[in-house]
Image (spheres, rainbow, N blue to C red):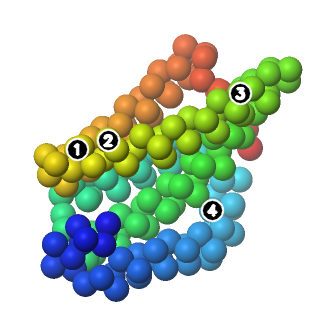
Amino acid sequence: TPNFMAAQGLALPLYSLLWTLNGALILLGQPFVLRLVRRLPAVKTQIVAGNALFVAEFVLLALGRACAVYVAAMVLSTLGEMLVWPAVPAAADRWSPAERRGAVQGVVTMAGFVGRMVGPLVGGLLFAAGPGMVFTVMAGAAGAAGIVYLALDRVGVAPVATTTN
């Protein structure tokens, strides 16, 4: 947040610059991400790669507070979002039987809303223990999500275990 960054000695315009960078990466990076996604063997690979970028982002934030760390973390986060967020509904669509697709999509959408609803509360509570705690827990949560996904895929429960793009 801008207050946290200001407390780290970083100027408020950096916060705006980070979100400008996010938007520019999304806009200008789409053609490159599209080419990358077309080369990946499965939607599963797209989800796992994006998840790994999230883990790297939070580890980076847990370890540093310099301007370059925030810029690198925003780049990692944006690329992770560009890989994961379109892949999750696609995976849910391919994973679910035709007669349950709407219900599965509803659960996927609901999970995102629950995360956006509970995340700020949990983040605020963790922040009381220090900003490093927030970033460490987030890295752990992203890593755990990736491990659970891969474990479910291994036993044949996770979506799109063999489906290609």
The tag on residue 33 is 4
How many numbered discs?
A: 4
Residue at the spot of label 1: 126
The secondary element bearing badge 4 is classed as: helix
Give the answer, above or below, for where 60 lies relative to 90: below
Residue at the spot of label 3: 104
Q: Mark 1 and mark 4 in contact (Cβ < 8 Å)? A: no
User: Is there any visible trace of residue 120 in the rendered image?
Assistant: yes
Identity of the amino acid at label 4? Val
Q: Mark 1 and mark 2 in contact (Cβ < 8 Å)? A: yes
Q: Around disc 1, counting alpha carbons within 10 Å, would you say few (fewer than 14), some (14 to 19), or many (20 or more)?
A: some
The secondary element bearing badge 1 is classed as: helix
Q: Quadrant of residue 100?
A: top right
**Rounded to the nearest whole Å, what is the CA distance between mark 2 and mark 1?**
6 Å
Residue 124: image x %, image y %?
A: 27, 49
Residue at the spot of label 2: 122
**Rounded to the nearest whole Å, what is the CA distance between mark 4 and mark 1?**
33 Å
Q: Residue at x 56, y 23 (%)?
A: 153
**Rounded to the nearest whole Å, what is the CA distance between mark 1 and mark 3?**
31 Å
Q: Earlier in the sequence, mark 3 or mark 4?
A: 4
Q: For this view, does 122 lie left or right of residue 162?
A: left
The mark closer to the camera, 1 or 3, is 1
Q: Nearer the viewer, residue 15 or 75?
A: 15
The mark closer to the camera, 4 or 2, is 2
Q: Around disc 2, counting alpha carbons within 10 Å, would you say few (fewer than 14), some (14 to 19), or many (20 or more)?
A: few
Q: Earlier in the sequence, mark 4 or mark 1?
A: 4
Identity of the amino acid at label 3? Val
**Rounded to the nearest whole Å, what is the CA distance between mark 3 and mark 4?**
26 Å
